[in-house]
Amino acid sequence: MWHGGLDSDGWHCVAPYRKKSLSGNEILVVWRPAGIRHDCGLGAACCLISIKARANTGAIMDWEENVRLALFADIHANRQAFSACLDFARARGAERIVCLGDIVGYGADPEWAVDTVMDLVNDGAIAVIGNHDQAIGTPSETMNAAAQIAIEWTRGRLSLAQRRFLAELPLTLREDDRLYVHSEASQPSQWRYVRDTPHAARSLEATDAHVTFCGHIHRPALYSMSSAAKMTSFIPTTDVPVQLLGGRRWLAVLGSVGQPRDGDPAASFAMLDTASREITYCRVPYDVETAADRIRANGLPRWLADRLLDGR
């Protein structure tokens, strides 16, 4: 049940942990805030959410609240890794979840992964689509041989509702001064990789967002651009907060939950404190052997299992 409704400016007032499906290109999202009140019953906890459609590629959402976000990319149907990351993030005080695509592909638990993200979205998380998610509904889209085998296997495992959920995820989503995208901002539907500083600059030049969050490359990195277009880049240190200073624009590449490729098998994600503008990259050890065994047991290419052990 919703407290309040949609006014002429597009503002919703919502009660905690409630969902409203919006038609067309508009994106749901409701969330449990700290307790802003607006047109609610006396004492109701609610927040203000402005949701506006943006063409066919994404949405714009404005939030009036400071929160701790947990941001995940490239889950790749790895149940053991994503479960460990969710537990870790909640223990660190995460108040809202953001999923940056590639929920499926490679891993052996796609049904669980999609159901988990669907449940998270119902409880206020937000999600965008990745290239593996898109490939489920686009048989003509081809990948390397191992990835293609995993996609075809996954396609046969998912229900119609699960496939529809993936297909309807937006390419990008803008929230306040943050842009969420799977690959990068200049041509998100082309699934380009951010491999280096010139690639990061191309993405940053395509948006005026203060911070863009992406995945896709499976390796964590942090880039920034000054007002004079001077670029900086570095590999963030685990558990060391970095303040995303004003006066620069930032591109935060999260690394991968379900298939890290930076030589560290521990799952990778990040947390953002929107009040302090501090981002902290996190690494979470998980039961890699079980995840690898699940891949082998389901007849998927052994290389997809072996690479988890080395984080490559």
Image: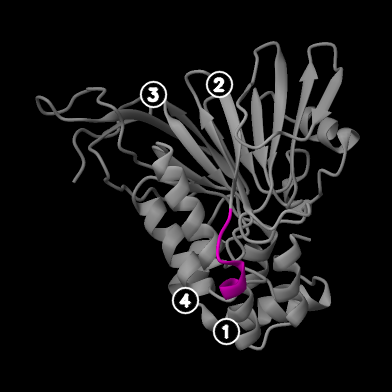
In the rendered structure, which amino acid carries the disc numbered 3? Glu
The type of residue carrying mark 2 is: Arg
| Badge 3 or badge 1: first in the primary sequence | 3
* Mark identifier at residue 65: 3
User: Which of the labelled discs sits on residue 148, or is there none?
Assistant: none
Residues shaded magenta = 285-291
Residue found 78% across the figure and 38% down from its top? 186
**Residue type for callout 4:** Leu
Residue 252 is situated, as x and y percent measured from the top left of the image, at: 69, 35
Please tell me whether mark 1 sits on a helix, a strand or a loop. Answer: helix
Q: Is residue 287 on the magenta stretch? A: yes
Residue 137 can be seen, yes or no: no
Mark 3 or mark 4, which is nearer the start of the sequence? 3
122 with respect to 242 (left or right): left
Residue at 60% across, 26% down: 241
**Numbered disc 3: secondary structure:** loop
Residue designated by label 1: 156
Q: Residues within 10 Å of mark 1 (few under 14, many from 20)?
A: few
Task: State the image quarter where residue 229 is shown.
Answer: top right
Q: Amino acid at mark 1?
A: Gly
Q: Which residue is most to the right?
A: 198
The local crowd at label 3, few if under 14, some if 14 to 19, many if 20 or more residues have their Cα within 10 Å, is some
Q: Nearer the viewer, mark 4 or mark 1?
A: 1
Residue behind mark 4: 160
Residue 33 location, x and y as percent? 31, 31
Q: Which residue is mark 2?
A: 277
